[in-house]
Image (spheres, grey):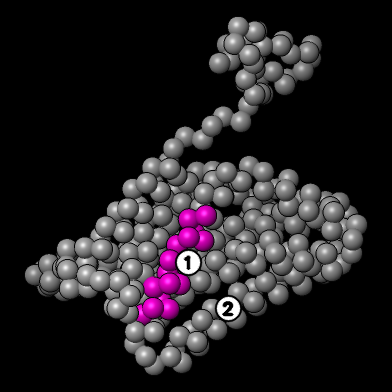
Amino acid sequence: MLGNYLIGLREGLEAALVVSILTAYLVKTGRRDALIPVWAGIGTAVAVSVGFALLLNLLVAQENHFKVQELAGGLLSIVAVALVTWMVFWMRTAARSIKAELEGKLAGALNVGPAALAVVAFVAVGREGLETALFLWINTSNSNSGSTPIIGALLGLATAVVLGYLLYRGGLRLNLKRFFTWTGIALIVVAAGVLGYGFHDLQEAGVLPGLGALALQPAEFFAGFGRAGQWTQTLLHGVFNLTPTVTWLQLIIWIAYLVPVMVLFLRPQAAGTPRTAPGRPAPAPAPGSASGSASGQGPGAA
């Protein structure tokens, strides 16, 4: 439930930010008439995302062959992890410029017509929606907790909608950089479990060897702690996709993904401010201008 809540919250807030930026721009520029095609594009994106998740569930559920199901689940897990990893790194670098980028696209679409506005909104929200649908479907299909993962995802999405509305109304000051950093760390951990589970599915499908080569047996270990151990195992399975038995390949893939991706994600970003040539003093700010102190190029700047 917690893992799906984080996914719903993170992805939902990204989509909510996109919606708030689009609608706020139209309201501030006096183009409320353009809200109708924008909301039509947003609604279509949500419907397509839900339909995509239902289609995945229908296609896999219709297939009765166990190995084919495991093969499909394994391959989709790898695709989902690739998309989420890209999204985490993209949001880390694009958080500062996403507003200007979206407003620029919307300004161009205003000159074209209502259909262009709907397309901009559909693409902006649909990208987040499809990623969310795929990742949540993978996590839900891998879980044995009934409807709990779905409830967690819905709660995360509901929280994101509330936060997005408060940001739009100006009643909430959220440090987005810190928010996306911490949720990115959590999602990388969740994605590592999904990737390991995906390779475990491929082993069960007979595509990869080593299904009987066990590195860990969490279920057997936690069984010694009674009901509390069972609850712990269920929690770890739901959040980190820690299966009752972990093969050596599954463990190696988990480490091979988690360690380098986490190091790259936490690596300090390069400063975006231009530097002066070595030995050349920085230009002094113009009289009455505050640009020197704002940009960090005033006296004492590195």
In the rendered view of the protein, which quadrant contains the N terminus? Answer: bottom left
Q: Let me know if residue 191 appears in the view.
A: yes
Determine which of the numbered discs, if any, sits on residue 79 in the image.
Answer: 1
Q: CA distance from mark 2 to mark 1?
A: 15 Å
- Specify the segment rendered in magenta: 70-86
Q: Residue furthest left?
A: 224
Vertical side of 20 occupied by 287: above or below: above
Q: Nearer the viewer, residue 199 or 233?
A: 199
Based on the picture, tell me whether residue 176 belongs to the magenta stretch.
Answer: no
* The image quarter in which residue 87 lies: bottom right
Q: Which residue is mark 2?
A: 52
Circle 2 sits in a helix, a strand or a loop, which is it? helix
Q: Closer to the N terminus: mark 2 or mark 1?
A: 2
| Local crowd size for mark 1, using a 10 Å CA cut-off: few (<14), some (14–19), many (≥20) | some
Residue 109 location in percent, x, y?
Answer: 84, 58
Residue shown at the point (37%, 65%) measured from the top left: 194
Based on the picture, tell me whether residue 75 belongs to the magenta stretch.
Answer: yes
Circle 1 sits in a helix, a strand or a loop, which is it? helix
Determine which of the numbered discs, if any, sits on residue 160 in the image.
Answer: none
Residue 231 location in percent, x, y?
Answer: 23, 71
Vertical side of 260 occupied by 233: above or below: below
Q: Nearer the viewer, residue 254 or 302?
A: 254
Q: Nearer the viewer, residue 101 or 31?
A: 101
| Left or right of 233, for residue 76 | right
Residue shown at the point (60%, 6%) measured from the top left: 279
Q: Nearer the viewer, residue 211 or 15?
A: 211
Indicate the amino acid at tag 1: Val
Indicate the amino acid at tag 2: Phe
| Local crowd size for mark 2, using a 10 Å CA cut-off: few (<14), some (14–19), many (≥20) | some
Vertical side of 243 occupied by 184: above or below: above
